[in-house]
Amino acid sequence: MMPASRPLSPHLQIYRWQITSVLSILHRFTGLALSLGTLLLVWWLVALASGPDAFATAQACVGSWLGRLLLLGWSFSLFFHLANGIRHLFWDAGYGFEIKTTTASGWAVVVASVALTVIAWVAGLATMVG
Amino acid sequence: MSAERLRSPLGRALGLGSAKEGADHWWLQRLTAVALVPLALWFVAALVAHLGVDRAAAVAWLRSPLTAIAMILLVVATFTHMALGLQVVIEDYVHREATKIASLVLVRLACWALGAAALFAVLRIAFGS
């Protein structure tokens, strides 16, 4: 058990919000979201393999208002986790640790993940229409 | 004289130190991450290109050998990466030993089950008549 008299480091909410810590939290959060999203992927694959009725049900759910909202969250989570994951791989290789660089690469990740999400949805809507 | 004193320094060290597998978790997490960069981008692009198709077209797409192989790689890399990632999250936040072990077992088994279901579905479509 923790002795009450021991000095503790400040809790998370003491610190000022900054891009590096926010993206670090978002990386874990989107990883969890993507893990939940795999349930949807498995369900869709199993439905596709099962037959026309199951597939029609799955497609209807995915195409519904709620389904599309989940897909939007899933696609952003994927692009963010992907872009920030590449940022992590650079760190793993020993590059980009300067504070200026981590801030810049952080904003690059934000821009890239939003842009990729927009591009994917515009392309998707174009497929649906055309 | 205790038995320990009769053992050579090498004998005392053997089996106690690194089995050179200490970085396996870390390494596999990075390996699957690298694999998932092209696989995830391919998967999203394929989804976008096939939005709204009927079941016959979706099945035809998945039956093509390249698609099926890429899907299998995607499923294996995804669930390996996911199992390792969720394990770290549990180890970070669940501190009661019994709850932690139960969560670790549950999550790992769930990843295997989900991966198996996904692989079976892909193979069933790929080899189905």
Image: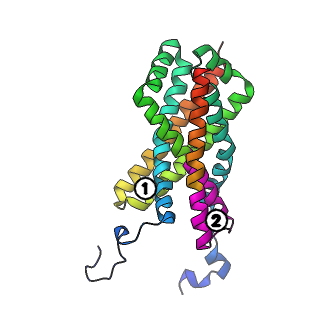
Hey, which residue is sitting farthest bottom in the picture?
A: B1
Q: Residue at x 58, y 21 (%)?
A: A129
Report the magenta residues as a range. A79-108
Against A3, is A30 above or below? above
Against A56, is B44 above or below? below
Q: Which mark is residue B90?
A: 1
Q: Residue at x 39, y 71 (%)?
A: A15
Q: Residue at x 32, y 82 (%)?
A: A7
- Chain letter for the residue marked with disc 1 in the picture: B
Res. A4 visible in picture: yes
Residue type (three-letter) at the residue carrying disc 2: Trp
Q: Which mark is residue A91?
A: 2
Residue type (three-letter) at the residue carrying disc 1: Ile
Q: Position of residue B35 (x, y in %)?
A: 68, 46
In-front residue for pair A127/A29: A127
Res. B16 visible in picture: no
* SS class, disc 2: helix
- Chain letter for the residue marked with disc 2 in the picture: A
Q: Position of residue A96 (x, y in %)?
A: 65, 68
Q: Quadrant of residue B123?
A: top right
